[in-house]
Amino acid sequence: MIAQENVSLKPYNTFGVEAHTRYFADVQTLADLDTILTWYRSQPNLPLLILGGGSNLLFTQDWPGLVLKLSLLEKPVVVEVGDEVLVKSSAGENWHDFVLYTLSQGYYGLENLSLIPGSVGASPLQNIGAYGVEIKDVFQQLEALNIQTGELKVFTAQECAFGYRDSVFKNAEKGKWIVVFVTFKLSKMPAVKIEYGTIKSVLEAHNITSPTPLQVSQAVTAIRQAKLPDPKTLGSAGSFFKNPIITKAALEKLKKEHPEIPNFAVSDSHFKVPAGWLIEKGGWKGKTFGTFGVHKDQALVLVNYGGATGLEIWELAKNIMQSVSDRFSIELAAEVNVI
Ligand code: EPU
């Protein structure tokens, strides 16, 4: 396996923005990965970027180094212990296909995470979450390759230090590892979670009161399809910003002017408020600037209607951050990786 030179990254990012990388390799096997990393280590000062599904980043410039697209695909390994099932997946597996595979096997726990774009290998990096479930709730362990030494190491949930859209791989261990396998702890006993958002009402509209995990997956899929753009037809990277966490005092102050502000306690003293609500209040929802804009159904999502540059989208994001800061004194942070 040898790296290709001067490759367009447009097909490899769900925003669909143009950017080129100096070197590119689509890695299909562990042997390929080993070969390309050996070459990479011989190149002085070459920046490395690992790509999974490309669904959580925005390129604002060309990449001066090597991009490794991780397409590692091997059949999942399953170990059943009573009602518990450990399912080990390769990093390159498409996340939603993996969710559907587990459901088809009668292994439950991932249903609320249906239709999240991206790959299995990227899922623990930002502890993906939706509809009241996060990866950390069903995570057993992952195996990652050390980029510099080639060492294969097992990381437990504790070692991953999961937080809200966060893990050790975005902090102390950033840029040091390539996740190659992730093992999930699922169950053969359904234990559906339908309290979050509109899952329950969507099911009830279909006269479903005791849903199966597959029905929950279908409801989540329908909700996401109604609110979030399909990256295949409209460029985006899902939520562009994280939901900010503010103090109780700050929330009380906000509530004086906006008693209706949605909020979720994360501790006795801190509350998460939806960035989508703050952005919508600022009048940004549905705003279009020619080739890019703010999604009409979910203000947390920025979209590329076709032909926008990453820089234009990043400028819009910065304007939104400034406007939320001016109006609410809340600093939004990007959830996507801005390059
Ligand atoms: N809201 C608005 N206006 C908007 C969007 C939302 O007022 O334009 C309000 C809603 O009315 C609701 C609240 O904000 O009261 C929460 O909205 P929603 O349930 O749509 O979820 P979110 O907080 O905007 C988060 C995740 C999503 C995930 C959903 C569902 C983050 C950054 N985003 O969005 O994740 O699908 O919850 O669990 O935590 C992603 O990470 O890419 C992503 C799509």
Image (cartoon, rainbow, N blue to C red):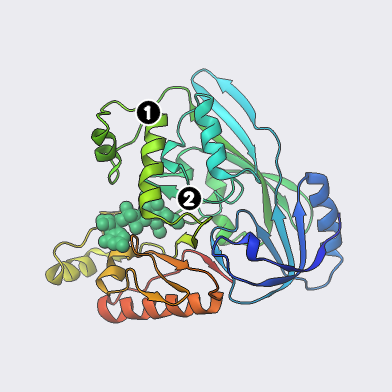
- Mark 1 and ligand 1: say if the CB distance to the nearest ligand atom is below 8 Å: no
Q: Quadrant of ligand 1?
A: bottom left
The image shows residue 66 at horizontal and vertical percentages of 75, 66
From the top left corner, tell me how far across and down residue 49 is, in percent. 68, 64
Quadrant in which the N terminus is drawn: bottom right
Which element type, helix, strand or loop, lies under badge 2? loop
The location of residue 6, given as percent across then percent down, is 77, 71
Residue bearing mark 2 = 128
Find residue 154 and report its image quarter: top right
Q: Residue, x 59% and y 48% (percent of image)?
A: 119
- Contact flag, marks 1 and 2 (Cβ < 8 Å): no
User: x, y (%) of residue 227?
Assistant: 36, 54
Q: Nearer the viewer, residue 48 or 13?
A: 13
Mark 2 Cβ and ligand 1 under 8 Å apart: yes
Element on which disc 1 rests: loop
Badge 1: residue crowd in 10 Å (few <14, some 14–19, many ≥20): few
Q: Which of marks 2 and 1 precedes in the sequence? A: 2
Residue reaching furthest top? 82
Can the viewer see residue 270?
no
Q: Amino acid at mark 2?
A: Ile
Which mark is on residue 191?
1
